[in-house]
Amino acid sequence: MLKFVDYDAKKIAAKLKQVEDFEAKYGENDMSKSWKKWCNSHEYRRREWLWRQNLAAANKELNNRNAI
């Protein structure tokens, strides 16, 4: 995949509801804060996607270098 395609708005809303339910039951923690930020920010999701793409490319490069 070469271009970021955002998730379906219904899936994002469902995840946000899940996070809010978790926080109501257990309280806020670092993971729930990051999920909330992910749900509420298109730019954050895009940057997270770019980070995963770069991580995969670096892993591929390292594996190719070790195969030689």
Image (cartoon, grey):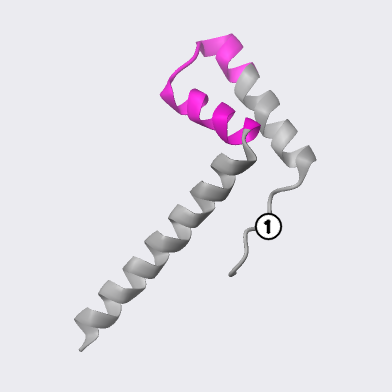
| Image height of 35 relative to 52, above or below | above
Image location of residue 32, percent across then percent down: 51, 24
Task: Categorize mark 1 by other alpha carbons within 10 Å: few (<14), some (14-19), many (20+).
Answer: few
Question: Which SS class for mark 1?
Answer: loop
Magenta segment's dominant SS is helix
Q: Position of residue 61 (x, y in %)?
A: 31, 75
48 versus 33 height, above or below: below
Q: Which residues are magenta?
A: 21-40
Question: Residue shown at 56%/30% (left/top)?
Answer: 37
Task: Looking at this view, name the residue that lies furthest to the right.
Answer: 10
> In the figure, 45 relative to 3: above or below?
above
Is residue 29 inside the magenta stretch? Answer: yes
Residue 65 against residue 57 in the figure, above or below: below
Tag 1: residue type?
Val
Tell me the quarter of the image containing the C terminus: bottom left
Q: Is residue 67 left or right of residue 57?
A: left
Q: Circle 1 is placed at which residue position?
A: 5
Q: Is residue 3 left or right of residue 50?
A: right
Residue sitting at x 58%, y 19%: 22
Q: Residue furthest bottom?
A: 68
Residue plotted at (42% across, 23% down): 30
> For the image shown, how many numbered marks are present on the structure?
1
Q: Residue at x 70, y 48 (%)?
A: 7
Q: On the rendered structure, is 30 left or right of 10?
A: left
Quarter the N terminus occupies: bottom right
Question: Relative to residue 20, is residue 58 drawn left or right?
Answer: left
Q: Position of residue 33 (x, y in %)?
A: 50, 23
**Residue 53 inside the magenta-drawn segment:** no
Q: Percent x, y for residue 14?
A: 73, 32
* Quarter of the view holding residue 18: top right
